[in-house]
């Protein structure tokens, strides 16, 4: 395979590892040093022996640059740097790959059986990539933290961390395809314990006194938004996203009306004082940022490309929601 010379593979530190213990790496592409995208790859999640199986579980337990799924030169959407319509074509990129089954927030080695031990090492891996982003692009005045699927779930947390590393930069979040997962205290505590997620709660004043049952995915937006008021939040979802239906059901949530879960989460976030711009498209597709559909999608007469471009340029955008979402 010929690797695009503009993409550099960076090997992780000794502390980094994929779920199966194999080496971890991430990608850097240098563009305008003042404009940075930190992108968190998606790829499922796991929290049981069956779902975490390295052979046939619900995530990829290692990273392989020969696999197009793990190599951004084969992705489309915001990774199509030759498309003049791409609003991020001139930006520098750091891509944190995902191979730990813990939505980039794990910090635990968990034995699910005598034959299956999983390195939920997602937080160490992605925060190592974020530190490289800070070291190499420390003068960036615009930082976009984006992610799809599992990467979308963690994007608000990493935006808060980016706000600490880039204290003068404008920070924006584009969370792509995770808007339906609710905050259920028992589930937060149970899955969080398997992943070690509570051990990486940032030492922000707004987090003082927070407990494991209170550390769910909507709280990542709430706490990051309260911590750094300059962060701007956005999300994209398909109203009946098949992947979100699957994982919500697997975690024990009622996913029969996924669109209602999305609306309730957004209401919860905004009632906490954090504004989140949202674009909800019809159908069951999953994710848009790394896909060519980014350039074609229109909902209720509004082009998603125009909407996200205006958001990234700092404009206030209206929420867009499909009327007939089937």
Image (cartoon, helix red, strand yellow):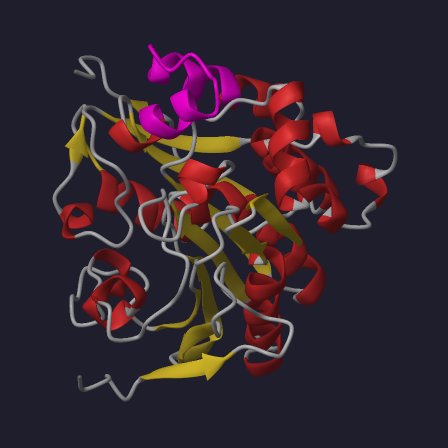
- What are the residue bounds of the magenta stretch? 245-265
116, above or below 64, in the image: above
Residue 268 in the figure: left or right of residue 36? right
Q: Residue at x 26, y 64 (%)?
A: 79
176, above or below 172, in the image: above
Q: Residue at x 22, y 66 (%)?
A: 68
The quadrant of the picture occupied by the C terminus is: top left
Residue 83 in the figure: left or right of residue 111? left
* Residue 198 on the magenta segment: no
Q: Position of residue 316 (x, y in %)?
A: 44, 38
- Res. 182 in view: yes
Residue 145 in the figure: left or right of residue 16? left
Residue 320 in the figure: left or right of residue 50? left
Is most of the magenta stretch helix, strand or loop? helix
Q: Position of residue 6 (x, y in %)?
A: 30, 85
Q: Nearer the viewer, residue 78 or 275?
A: 78
* Residue 252 on the magenta segment: yes
- Res. 316 in view: no
The quadrant of the picture occupied by the N terminus is: bottom left
């Amino acid at each position: 395979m010929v690797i695009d010379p503009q993409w550099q593979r960076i090997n992780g530190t000794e502390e980094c590892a994929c779920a199966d213990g194999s080496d971890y790496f991430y990608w850097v592409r240098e563009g305008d040093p003042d404009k940075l995208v930190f992108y968190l790859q998606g790829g499922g999640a796991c929290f049981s022996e069956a779902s975490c199986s390295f052979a046939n579980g619900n995530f990829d337990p290692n990273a392989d640059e020969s696999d197009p799924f793990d190599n951004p030169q084969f992705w489309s959407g915001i990774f199509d740097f030759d498309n003049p319509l791409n609003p991020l074509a001139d930006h520098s990129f750091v891509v944190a790959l995902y191979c730990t089954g813990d939505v980039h927030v794990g910090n635990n080695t968990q034995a699910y059986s005598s034959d299956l031990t999983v390195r939920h090492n997602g937080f160490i891996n992605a925060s190592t990539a974020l530190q490289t982003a800070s070291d190499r692009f420390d003068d960036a005045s615009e930082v976009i933290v984006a992610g799809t699927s599992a990467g979308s779930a963690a994007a608000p947390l990493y935006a808060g961390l980016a706000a600490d590393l880039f204290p003068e930069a404008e920070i924006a979040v584009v969370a792509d395809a995770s808007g339906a997962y609710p905050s259920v205290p028992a589930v937060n505590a149970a899955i969080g314990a398997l992943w070690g997620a509570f051990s990486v709660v940032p030492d922000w004043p707004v987090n003082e006194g927070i407990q494991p049952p209170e550390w769910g995915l909507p709280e990542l937006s709430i706490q990051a938004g309260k911590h750094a008021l300059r962060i701007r939040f956005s999300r994209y979802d398909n109203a009946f996203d098949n992947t979100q239906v699957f994982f919500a059901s697997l975690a024990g949530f009622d996913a029969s009306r996924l669109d209602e879960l999305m609306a309730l989460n957004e209401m919860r976030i905004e009632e906490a004082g954090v504004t989140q711009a949202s674009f909800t498209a019809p159908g069951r597709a999953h994710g848009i940022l790394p896909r060519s559909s980014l350039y074609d999608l229109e909902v209720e007469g509004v082009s998603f490309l125009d909407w996200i471009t205006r958001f990234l340029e700092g404009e206030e955008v209206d929420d867009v929601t499909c009327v007939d979402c089937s």
